[in-house]
Image (cartoon, rainbow, N blue to C red):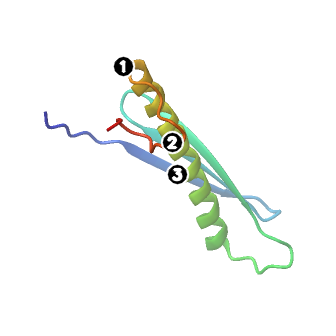
Amino acid sequence: MPHTTEWRVRLDLFEDDDGTTKAHVVLDTGTTELTGQGTAHCHPADANVPEIGDELAAGRALQNIAQRLLDTAERDIEGVGVPRPSPRQVTGWPT
């Protein structure tokens, strides 16, 4: 049963005057949208390198949305009658 689909990801970055970078990511599956957020703060003693703030905020937003996606998958698996995995078991179909 081959399956091919395309999901779209949009990642927006915003930097405030106080050195805070915020990231907002949207995953559009075609049937639903998941969102994630991340932030990074430049320490006053550090050099202001915007690329580093972008990388940290984007990475944290992607981690946030990844966790939301895994949580959704676990609920969906449970919804088709498969019990939740034990804390030691990796998320996915049980073996």
Label 1 or label 2, whichever comes before in sequence order: 2
Say whether residue 17 is left or right of residue 71. right
Which mark lies nearer to you, 1 or 3? 1
- Residue at image mark 1: 80
Residue type of the residue flagged with mark 3 = Leu
Which quadrant would the N terminus be assigned to in this image?
top left
Position of residue 92 measured from the top left corner of the image (x, y, whole percent): 38, 39
* Mark 1 crowdedness (10 Å alpha carbons): few <14, some 14-19, many ≥20: few
- Residue 11 marker: 3
Please, what is the three-letter code of the amino acid marked with disc 1? Val
Report x, y in % for residue 39. 70, 55
- 76, 4: nearer the viewer: 76
- At horizontal 65% and vertical 52% (from top left) the residue drawn is 38
The secondary structure type at the circle numbered 3 is strand
Q: CA distance from mark 2 to mark 3?
A: 7 Å
User: What crowding class fits label 3: few (fewer than 14 Cα within 10 Å), some (14-19), or many (20 or more)?
Assistant: some
Q: Which mark is residue 67?
A: none
Say left or right for 5 vs 67. Answer: left
User: Label 1 to label 3, Cα distance in Å?
Assistant: 32 Å
**78 lies above or below 92:** above
Q: On the picture, is 29 further left or further right than 68?
A: left
What secondary structure is marked by label 2? strand
Residue bearing the label numbered 2 = 26
Quadrant in which the C terminus is drawn: top left
Residue 69: x and y, percent? Answer: 48, 39
Q: Quarter-wise, where is residue 59 in the image?
A: bottom right
Task: Answer whether labels 2 and 3 touch (C-beta < 8 Å).
Answer: yes
Direction left: furthest residue: 1
Image height of 39 relative to 47, above or below: above
Select label 1 or label 2 by which is in front.
1
Question: Residue drawn 58% across and 43% down?
Answer: 36
